[in-house]
Amino acid sequence: MFKTTFKKDLANNKMLVTREFAGTIEDVWRAWTTHEILDQWWAPLPWKAVTKSMNFREGGSWLYYMQGPEGERHYARMNYKKILAPNLFEGIDSFCDENGVENKDMPGMNWKVQFKPSANGTVVEINITADSQKDLETIVQMGFEEGFSAAHQNLEELLNIRV
C-alpha cells in the first residue's frame, strides 16, 4: 500500500504532495481528469464529490461540491490553465458558491499536477502554491492533508477494482 506524503515549504508558500498509485499512467490520468471517475474518489468518506460541470481543456473548469453526511455542501472550482496529456495539468483551485463565483475570503491554490510512470505504476506529484504563508497554513488547518490522503486511498481502492 502506498502513502501520500506532504512536504511543506512555508517560507515560499508551497507544498509538494506525492502519491504512487498501482495503475497505468493512462488510468491514473483518466481518474484525475474525468468527472465520472473523480466523483467516485475525490471526497474523503463519508463525504462525496458531485460534479456540476466539467470542461477539461485549457481555459476550461471543473465546478463541483463536496457533500457531507448531513447534506451540507462546500463548492470549489478548478480553472485549468495548462494541459499536457497524460503527463501534466495546471490550474487554480478556489472555493466558490454554487454558481462558481470565487469566494475571495477563502484561500485559493495554484496546482501543478504531474504524472510519471514508476516501477509500481504511476507517481503523481502535486506542487501547490498559495498566495501567502497564511493562506497555506489555513488550508492545512482546514484538514487538507487528512482529507487528501483519504481521497487518495479512495482512488487506490478504485484503481485496484478496475485492474
Image (cartoon, helix red, strand yellow):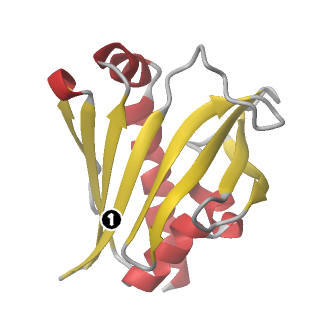
In this orientation, does residue 42 appear? no
Q: Residue at x 60, y 42 (%)?
A: 45
From the viewer's side, name the closer residue of 82 and 23. Answer: 82
The relative height of residue 86 versus residue 146 in the rendered view (above or below) is below
- Residue 16 occupies quadrant: top left
Q: Residue at x 29, y 50 (%)?
A: 4
- Residue 34 occupies quadrant: bottom right
Expressed as whole percent of the image width and height from the top left, the position of residue 141 reads 40, 17
Quick one: quadrant of the N terminus?
Answer: bottom left
From the viewer's side, name the closer residue of 161 and 73. Answer: 73
Expressed as whole percent of the image width and height from the top left, the position of residue 3 reads 27, 53
Q: Quick one: label 1, few (<14), some, or many (20+) residues within 10 Å? A: many
- Residue 19 occupies quadrant: bottom left
Secondary structure at numbered mark 1: strand
Residue at label 1? 114
The relative height of residue 50 versus residue 30 in the rendered view (above or below) is above
Residue type of the residue flagged with mark 1? Gln
The relative height of residue 4 versus residue 76 in the rendered view (above or below) is below
In this orientation, does residue 28 appear? yes
Q: Residue at x 19, y 28 (%)?
A: 12
Whether residue 27 sits left or right of residue 62 in the image: it is: left
Whether residue 70 sits left or right of residue 115 in the image: it is: right
Q: Residue at x 58, y 57 (%)?
A: 41
Expressed as whole percent of the image width and height from the top left, the position of residue 63 reads 72, 47
Expressed as whole percent of the image width and height from the top left, the position of residue 125 reads 29, 58
